[in-house]
Image (cartoon, rainbow, N blue to C red):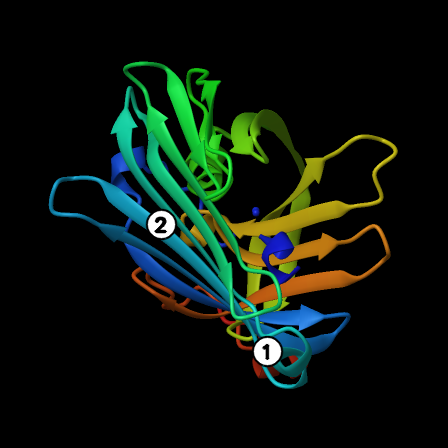
């Protein structure tokens, strides 16, 4: 379930082109109802052939690792087409627990077919233009937030079908992370009115709109939270306000 917190202004908005999204490595502290439960590691890298790879790995720690030792890893390989992210391959693997899970998506854009393999019953779907996988859409959102719209819509390949993710811009908000305080744009994924599940994320314009906080509420009220605690590849100098300085009343210029 830790993956569900994912499977999404100190400076003027950064007008980054999609190809300028830098390689980075981000580590998040994962909390379950306020108790530390594990870690989330996300990494964007560039391949020699010009494609990019985005990976996300979640692992329980401490007492939670005893009850739920699963390791969840997602990998998305993608390229750019018409200034938009175009996924090529997506892989989801959950291992180490009572139930392993495997799902692979191959995007055949020439034939407009999505090939799905869960190691049991492989099948295909018609591939719509601009379809994303449920991992790489976070990068698409980071890029699109420079457009400063009130709402963003994405077609996502998930669960054997193509769904619409609607992301609503709520407000500007300063949040506290282990790295300090930072100004963000608060976003919420809109769901069916009857759904009790809720996903909210806070993206920092000063960090290329990287999410610095994610919060997911399950239908039973369980709350998963991820807070950014380490970041490489995106400069952080003079971006975060130290928490102790805020408490003392001193805020640097």
Spatial separation of the CA atoms under disc 1 and disc 2: 31 Å
Q: Which mark is residue 184?
A: none
- Which quarter of the rendering shows the N terminus? bottom right
Depth check, mark 1 against mark 2: the one in front is 2
The mark nearer the N terminus, 1 or 2, is 2
Q: Which residue is mark 2?
A: 54
Structural crowding at the residue carrying mark 1, measured as other residues with C-alpha within 10 Å and reported as few (<14), some (14–19) or many (≥20): some
Q: Secondary structure at mark 1?
A: helix
Indicate whether 253 appears above or below 126: below
- Residue 53 in percent (x, y) is at 30, 48
- Residue 110 in percent (x, y) is at 27, 15
Structural crowding at the residue carrying mark 2, measured as other residues with C-alpha within 10 Å and reported as few (<14), some (14–19) or many (≥20): many
Check if mark 1's residue and mark 2's residue have beta carbons within 8 Å: no
| Residue 249 visible in the snapshot | no
In the rendered structure, the answer to whether residue 33 lies left or right of residue 155 reads: right
Indicate whether 89 appears above or below 209: above
Q: Quarter-wise, where is residue 146 in the image?
A: top left
| Residue 35 visible in the snapshot | yes
Closer to the camera in the image, 76 or 85? 76
Q: Which mark is residue 243?
A: 1
Closer to the camera in the image, 30 or 134? 134
Closer to the camera in the image, 234 or 112? 112
- Residue 135 in percent (x, y) is at 47, 44
Seen from this angle, which residue lies furthest left? 48
- Residue 145 in percent (x, y) is at 49, 36
Q: Secondary structure at mark 2?
A: strand
Closer to the camera in the image, 171 or 109? 109
At x 55%, y 62%, the residue is 182
Indicate whether 8 appears above or below 81: below
At x 60%, y 52%, the residue is 202
């Amino acid at each position: 379930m830790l993956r569900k917190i994912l499977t999404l202004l100190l400076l003027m908005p950064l007008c980054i082109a999609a190809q300028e999204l830098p390689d980075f490595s981000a580590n998040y502290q994962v909390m379950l109802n306020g108790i530390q439960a594990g870690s989330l590691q996300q990494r964007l890298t560039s391949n020699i052939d010009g494609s990019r790879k985005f990976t996300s790995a979640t692992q329980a720690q401490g007492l939670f690792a005893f009850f739920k030792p699963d390791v969840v890893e997602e990998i998305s390989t993608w390229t750019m087409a018409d200034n938009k992210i175009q996924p090529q391959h997506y892989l989801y693997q959950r291992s180490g627990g009572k139930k392993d899970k495997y799902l692979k998506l191959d995007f055949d854009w020439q034939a407009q077919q999505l090939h799905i393999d869960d190691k049991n019953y492989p099948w295909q779907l018609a591939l719509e233009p601009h379809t994303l996988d449920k991992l790489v859409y976070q990068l698409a959102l980071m890029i699109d937030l420079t457009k400063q719209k009130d709402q963003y819509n994405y077609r996502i390949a998930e669960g054997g079908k193509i769904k619409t993710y609607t992301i609503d811009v709520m407000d500007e908000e300063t949040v506290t992370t282990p790295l300090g305080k930072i100004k963000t744009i608060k976003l919420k994924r809109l769901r069916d009115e009857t759904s009790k599940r809720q996903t909210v994320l806070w993206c920092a314009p000063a960090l290329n709109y990287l999410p610095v906080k994610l919060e997911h509420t399950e239908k039973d009220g369980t709350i998963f939270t991820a807070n950014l605690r380490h970041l490489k590849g995106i400069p952080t100098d003079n971006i975060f306000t130290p928490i102790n300085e805020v408490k003392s009343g001193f805020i640097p210029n």
